[in-house]
């Protein structure tokens, strides 16, 4: 089997890399001295942009630590699946990735709206496209 990655694999690994970096950023927001990027993002997403979001509460910091760790781990899992497993069992791996991405998108977006941060759905759409775009048309066969 070739060790060269397909365009689909490279695209999925790009999406996974962005997800891991975002997860690391979220986890680092648990440290007050390092939370400025996430604090500014939260301030934009929870409009108006007014500096009210401090992320200082211990439960907020815990939430960022947990969600960042989960996001990093999810990205790493997809990175791994986009390699040899995708080459060996493409339909099964694509199905797993699609299901996990769609489940994340629906729950995260609904939760964002419930938390009065509906603007986060726009960011979620970017991540959704990052994952689904590389798999577009994959597995389709031409009609004989």
Image: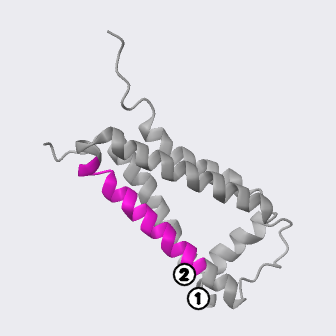
Please determine whether, in this image, residue 56 is positioned above or below residue 90.
Answer: below
User: Would residue 7 be visible to someone looking at this image?
Assistant: no
Element on which disc 1 rests: loop
> Magenta segment, which residues?
64-85
Q: Residue at x 63, y 79 (%)?
A: 63
Distance from disc 1 to disc 2, alpha carbons, whole Å, reads 6 Å
User: Would residue 130 be visible to someone looking at this image?
Assistant: yes
**Label 1 crowd (10 A; few <14 / some 14-19 / many >=20):** some
Name the outermost residue toward the top.
144
Is residue 108 or residue 132 the one in the foreground?
108
Element on which disc 2 rests: helix
Give the overall secondary structure of the magenta segment. Answer: helix
Q: Which residue is mark 2?
A: 28
Q: Which mark is residue 31?
A: 1
Estimate the x, y position of residue 75 in percent, counting from the top left.
43, 62
Please determine whether, in this image, residue 88 is positioned above or below residue 106.
Answer: above
Q: Quadrant of residue 129?
A: top right
Estimate the x, y position of residue 39 in percent, counting from the top left.
70, 76
Is residue 125 or residue 37 the one in the foreground?
125
Q: Residue at x 41, y 53 (%)?
A: 14
Please determine whether, in this image, residue 127 is positioned above or below residue 137.
Answer: below
Tag 1–tag 2 contact (CB < 8 Å):
yes
Quadrant showing the N terminus: top left
Estimate the x, y position of residue 12 in percent, counting from the top left.
40, 49
């Amino acid at each position: 089997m070739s060790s060269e990655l397909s365009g689909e694999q490279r695209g999925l690994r790009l999406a996974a890399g962005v997800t891991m970096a975002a997860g690391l950023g979220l986890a680092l927001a648990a440290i007050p001295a390092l939370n400025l990027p996430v604090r500014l993002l939260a301030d934009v997403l929870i409009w108006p942009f007014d500096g009210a979001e401090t992320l200082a509460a211990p439960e907020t910091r815990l939430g960022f630590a947990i969600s960042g760790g989960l996001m990093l781990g999810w990205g790493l899992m997809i990175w791994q699946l986009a390699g040899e497993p995708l080459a060996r069992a493409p339909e099964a791996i694509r199905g797993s990735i699609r299901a996990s991405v769609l489940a994340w998108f629906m729950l995260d977006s609904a939760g964002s709206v419930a938390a009065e941060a509906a603007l986060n759905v726009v960011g979620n759409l970017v991540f959704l496209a990052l994952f689904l775009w590389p798999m577009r048309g994959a597995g389709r066969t031409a009609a004989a």
